[in-house]
Amino acid sequence: MGPVNVWRWSLWGLLLSLLCSSCLGSPSPSVAPEKRAGSQGLRFRLAGFPRKPFEGRVEIQRAGEWGTICDDDFTLQAAHILCRELGFTEATGWTHSAKYGPGTGRIWLDNLSCSGTEQSVTECASRGWGNSDCTHDEDAGVICKDQRLPGFSDSNVIEVEHHLQVEEVRLRPAVGRGRRPLPVTEGLVEVRLPDGWSKVCDKGWSAHNSHVVCGMLGFPSEKRVNTAFYRLLAQRQQHSFGLHGVVCVGTEAHLSLCSLEFYRTNDTTRCPGGAPAVVSCVPGPLYAASSGQKKQQQSKLQEEARVRLKGGAHPGEGRVEVLKAGTWGTVCDRKWDLQAASVVCRELGFGSAREALSGARMGQGMGAIHLSEVRCSGQEPSLWKCPHKNITAEDCSHGQDAGVRCNLPYTGVETRIRLSGGRSRHEGRVEVQIGGPGPLRWGLICGDDWGTLEAMVACRQLGLGYANHGLQETWYWDSGNITEVVMSGVRCTGTELSLDQCAHHGTHIACKRTETRFTAGVICSETASDLLLHSALVQETAYIEDRPLHMLYCAAEENCLSHSARSANWPYGHRRLLRFSSQIHNLGRADFRPKAGRHSWVWHECHGHYHSMDIFTHYDILTPNGTKVAEGHKASFCLEDTECQEDVSKRYECANFGEQGITVGCWDLYRHDIDCQWIDITDVKPGNYILQVVINPNFEVAESDFTNNAMKCNCKYDGHRIWVHNCHIGDAFSEEANKRFERYPGQTSNQII
């Protein structure tokens, strides 16, 4: 018997389910009868690709006709109602812009508005059945909790096409034995069907097909492969084929979105005149095989970078930010879909998009929103090549910032690290696997110099997100029978994918404290804070004040003046201070909390407050070549929510020994007239300088992103006045803009004016 087309089976499955339902009647579920009565005459199902059994595009059958729901005004409350209609306990999320592919037929509901208490979707407000101004590009979907309602007897069609879905794809190397380097970039294409893994017939196989497969496996592009060699090899082996007739356009984010034909189990003739499909992929910069190739690709990517991801807990995910006129800004999620998200992912060296995120799921950005209504075909080399709208602040808010989750190559790094002794899988003593070519063994890491940056890499390698804490003592966690320290001197920048990419002592172990109680541990979290200084406010508020010494006793006690102040003629004379306001926003997805508990905060009688961190901010005056000529610092004496966004409530207020911190969506304002909110420039000579402000300089508290913790400004001092201009966050400028910053007129001269 010949191959059967996927769509023909879909229609037979639907017809069969309809006939069974009409013959047997609707069974009586054990849920409240009012719920079923409200939906009388309606049937529901989940459809689309790629998806799991509890998620998909919502389709409703009314008057014998299947249709969809428009995503306009759709909310989680509506998703809850629909998931219960489908027999699930609740919804965990919802999707827009036809994430699971556009449906067909009528769009039954538009502007659907539910409170979440309705027994049926028919009780929710809408424009009325069949009254819609949407297209199927706006079809809504739901993600339900994978838990069924007790006693639910399902008369709905939930998975008409489940047995025909391609769930996963992998490459199986055809040659070579022993330990192969990961990721696998070339091999025979295999797809996982309900019956197991099967190969794909290569008749009609195209570069577009390879492009889609590589994208699913986390690679940005494909390359030509020696098919003659593989065909010769295939003649000596037996192959099981499950799929043929694959036709992709090349822009699909998943192979299931291509036209496919499946072999039936009793087919006797498989792939006549053909062979197994073979694909070879090109890895992105993070996954390049050789270190030289990796550095070359990374430097090229950084030089040309006009798109980046921020706020993601894992590689290849985050809020999308784009560079325009030297300033980074976000993308509005209107019409944001898998095609646009895939363009971003491939541009950054990953595969196609696994998910297009809306509603600031990766945290809200700050500043400009550069793009809206981005419409990509999926073939563009950059997001900037896609049609889009330039918008104003009134058109979109940061609550609508777009994000992505990209497909990543499988590297196996998570198998070489584990945690032991913790109360949950997110914490414990770090154990790493070493060895080879000899036998592999597990061991501990020396706790010397182990800190937040090293812990961040460990948590990332474990797939557990960010590090809340990096611990140098782990005596309270039992390590079982693992007692050998196998790694020491670990020093990471925080961006590595695994600990073996960090600098360390190699095979020679040098550990000051050799007991197992002094070995490295971590506490990981899926979310983290992210502090960002409002640089424009620094520029607007900077000024010089000559303050009498008799008013600076408290400041001297807290070491907020330069060293020469100790030998001043107290209480006579004055100190010259550069003052400015600093407004520090938390753009992350977790509150910023001091590392030290309240029991260890230090009371400062002079100013009448508690210090919860030794150093919260560094203030420096630098020469153009980076030499420090003056410095200041800010202990977090009053870390609190000064103001918040409209929809966020304040949580931290340090008065009366209150809790200290900065809530997500809030900011802490240190006004220019607060004690120690300055740099003592009494000894600074007139000239051209750089003002630098660094938040959380010692990485004492974990953040999702440390690259935006530094701010720089040009400043010119003539001995009487100071001009502060061109303030920007350290990573906010393009390479060209940074070169202009370093070479502005007079910058290289420090002569007295």
Image: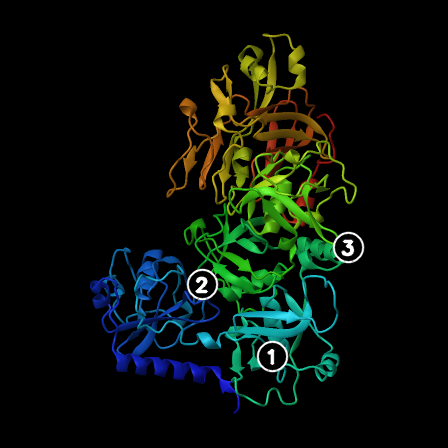
Tags 1 and 3 in contact by the CB under 8 Å rule?
A: no
- The answer to which quarter of the image holds residue 14 is bottom left
In this view, the mark in front (1 or 3)? 3
In this view, the mark in front (2 or 3)? 3
Q: Position of residue 54 (x, y in %)?
A: 41, 65
Colour theme: rainbow
Q: Position of residue 702 (x, y in %)?
A: 56, 39
**In the rendered view, would you say 21 is above or below 101?**
below
SS at badge 3: loop
Q: Of 368 and 11, which appears nearest the observer?
A: 11
Q: Position of residue 303 (x, y in %)?
A: 68, 53
Q: Is residue 2 visible?
A: yes
Residue at the spot of label 3 = 438
CA separation in Å, label 1 and label 3: 37 Å
Numbered-mark total: 3
CA separation in Å, label 1 and label 2: 34 Å
Q: Of 504 and 718, which appears nearest the observer?
A: 504
Residue at the spot of label 1 = 200
Identified by mark 2, the residue type is Lys
SS at badge 2: loop
Looking at the image, residue 150 sits to the left or right of residue 448; the answer is left
Considering only order in the chain, which callout, 3 or 2, is on the residue closer to the N terminus?
2
Considering only order in the chain, which callout, 2 or 1, is on the residue closer to the N terminus?
1
Residue at the spot of label 2 = 335
Tags 1 and 2 in contact by the CB under 8 Å rule?
A: no
CA separation in Å, label 2 and label 3: 54 Å
Dot 1: few (<14), some (14–19), or many (≥20) neighbours within 10 Å?
many
Identified by mark 3, the residue type is Gly
What numbered label is drawn on residue 512?
none
Image quarter of the C terminus? top right
Tags 2 and 3 in contact by the CB under 8 Å rule?
A: no
